[in-house]
Structures are given as structure tokens and as C-alpha cells.
Image (cartoon, rainbow, N blue to C red):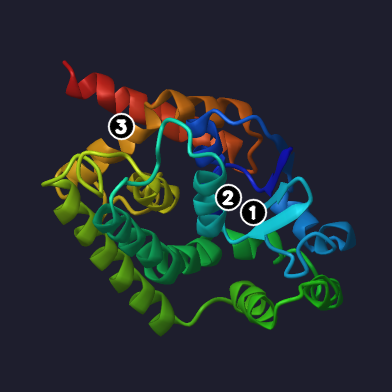
């Protein structure tokens, strides 16, 4: 039996969720609410001592790290549709893109997300309440990030992260301007993992992602959103950002209708 512990379908939690839906695999979904810090609960830290999601439990075998989970699913369930190229070179190209997401693209977008939204989750806590919450976080690096988010990230750091985001957007646009998917003609984990971070950027970073500057990137985002598996995932999965997602969907639909007139 497959059990996936995750937040809603966004960022790193979206990766294995979409892979599961794309492959049509039956699984039990356990939603943890980040606003309630459920991933720092003692019961969950028995499953993943790092207190992070997503986590896959496959008949008692625990797999962590979002991209690793996606690769594990492809290894264990090599059923159609294949989400990895069949040839070694194609798989290498796919992993260049998934590695880039994990080591570069995700981090700069995440920092801005923490600055804009995540920090607000703890600003209402007094110092004592906040420190009690931080004490439950296993990873020192995450404790530092929570403290920075509450206090506010340094201006220089935010400017550097925005520079990285602008570079990331240009790289994706350049590739998708000449290729239907990130690895040629096949939809792969490269697309899923990058989509997990890029989806919604036209709303969060409209000065960078828009119809004028990034038409290929927007078309790719919409292609994935229109896939039956992606639609089903967003329909079925609980989300901490449900209202925000519904507003984005409505705006995307309106833009699509306007473009077809």
C-alpha cells in the first residue's frame, strides 16, 4: 500500500502527488496542515525525524525527498505513462532539470514565498510561543529560516533571490520556446518538478512571468494544468491554499477565453 504524507498540491508536495495521479496509482493521502505545524508533531517525526514533507510509505518502507520519491515511484511502477525517457541520455537530461530545481530554482522562489507568506504564520505569536514552536523543529537550518521569516529577510538577500528567479524564468522560457516539454517531446519528471515551482508564478511574479515576456512558459504551465491527472489532483487534494488556487484558476480561465476571441 502507498501512503503519501504531504501538504497541499504545491511546491515540493506537488511533485509526488502529480506523479501518483499521472500514473493512476492508488494511494492513501494524509494531509498535514502547515499552518498548524502538524509536520512538527511527535507522531509525524516518528515517520520522518526531519519533520518534513512529503514522505512516502510503501508497505512500511519510508522514502523521503520529493524528487527521490518521484524516481522511486517510476522504479517500482514502470507502468504507462512513463515519466522518464527510455534512453540514458534522455534520463540524464531529465535529471539535469530535476537537480536544478532542487538545488537552485526551488530555493530562490521558496525564500520569497517565506518572506511574503510563511512568515505571517508566526508573527501573531509572542516570543515565548514562537520559541516553543521552533524547539519542535528538528533541523537547525529550518529553525534559522523560521526566525528569519518572522523577523524579515535582509534586503540584500531578497534582491539576490529575485535575481535568481529572473534568471530561472529566462532559462525556462528559452528552453520551452524551442521544445514542447523540457526534455524534447516527452512529458517527464523534469516537467512535473519544475511545474511544482513555476505554477502560479504569473500571479506571484507578474513582472517576470507574463504573456509578453514568457509566452512559452505560460503555454507550458497551462498545458500541464489542463492534463486530466493535474485537474484531478487539484480537484481531490485538500490544500492550505485552496481559495488562492481557485482565484488563480478563475483568472487563468478568463485569460484563456480572452486569448481565443
Q: Is residue 14 left or right of residue 164?
A: right
Classify residue 239 by image quadrant: top right
Would you name the residue on which mark 3 appears? 223
Q: Please tell me which residue lies in front, 53 or 27.
A: 27
Give the class, few, some or many, for how many residues have Cα within 10 Å of label 1's Cα (few <14, many ≥20): many
Q: Tell me the quadrant of the picture where the N terminus can be found.
A: top right
The disc, 3 or 2, on the residue closer to the chain's N-terminal end is 2
Choose the circle earlier in sequence order: 3 or 1.
Answer: 1
Q: Where, by quadrant of the figure, is residue 106 drawn?
A: bottom left
**Where does the image place residue 18, in percent across and percent down from the top left?**
51, 39
Q: Secondary structure at mark 3?
A: helix
- Say whether residue 256 is left or right of residue 67: left
Quadrant assignment, res 95: bottom left
Badge 3 density bin: few <14, some 14–19, many ≥20, Cα 10 Å: few
Contact check, label 3 and label 1, Cβ < 8 Å: no
Q: Residue furthest top?
A: 261
Picture quarter with the C terminus: top left
In percent of width and height, residue 160 lies at: 34, 78
Could you say whether the residue bearing mark 1 is in a helix, strand or loop? loop
Residue 52: percent from left, percent from top: 68, 62
Residue 13's disc number = 2
Alpha-carbon span between mark 3 and mark 1: 25 Å
Q: Residue furthest left?
A: 178
Amino acid at each position: 500500500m502507498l501512503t503519501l504524507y504531504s501538504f497541499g498540491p504545491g511546491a515540493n508536495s506537488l511533485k509526488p502527488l502529480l506523479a501518483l495521479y499521472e500514473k493512476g496509482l492508488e494511494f492513501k493521502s494524509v494531509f498535514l496542515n502547515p499552518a498548524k505545524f502538524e509536520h512538527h508533531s511527535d507522531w509525524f517525526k516518528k515517520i520522518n525525524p526531519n519533520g518534513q514533507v512529503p514522505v512516502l510509505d510503501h508497505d512500511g518502507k519510508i522514502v523521503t525527498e520529493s524528487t527521490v520519491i518521484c524516481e522511486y515511484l517510476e522504479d517500482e511502477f514502470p507502468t504507462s505513462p512513463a515519466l522518464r525517457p527510455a534512453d540514458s541520455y534522455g534520463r540524464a537530461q531529465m535529471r539535469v532539470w530535476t537537480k536544478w530545481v532542487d538545488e537552485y530554482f526551488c530555493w530562490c522562489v521558496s525564500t520569497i514565498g517565506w518572506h511574503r507568506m510563511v512568515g505571517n504564520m508566526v508573527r501573531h505569536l509572542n516570543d515565548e510561543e514562537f520559541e516553543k514552536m521552533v524547539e519542535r523543529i528538528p533541523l537547525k537550518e529550518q529553525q534559522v529560516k523560521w526566525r528569519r521569516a518572522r523577523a524579515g529577510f535582509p534586503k540584500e538577500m531578497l534582491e539576490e533571490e529575485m535575481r535568481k528567479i529572473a534568471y530561472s524564468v529566462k532559462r525556462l522560457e528559452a528552453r520551452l520556446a524551442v521544445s514542447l516539454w523540457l526534455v524534447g517531446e516527452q512529458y517527464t519528471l523534469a516537467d512535473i518538478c519544475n511545474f511544482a515551482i513555476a505554477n502560479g508564478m504569473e500571479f506571484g511574479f507578474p513582472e517576470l512571468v507574463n504573456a509578453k515576456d514568457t509566452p512559452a512558459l505560460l503555454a507550458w504551465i497551462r498545458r500541464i494544468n489542463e492534463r486530466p491527472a493535474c485537474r484531478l489532483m487539484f480537484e481531490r487534494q485538500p490544500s492550505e491554499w485552496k481559495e488562492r488556487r481557485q482565484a488563480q484558476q478563475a483568472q487563468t480561465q478568463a485569460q484563456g477565453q480572452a486569448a481565443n476571441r
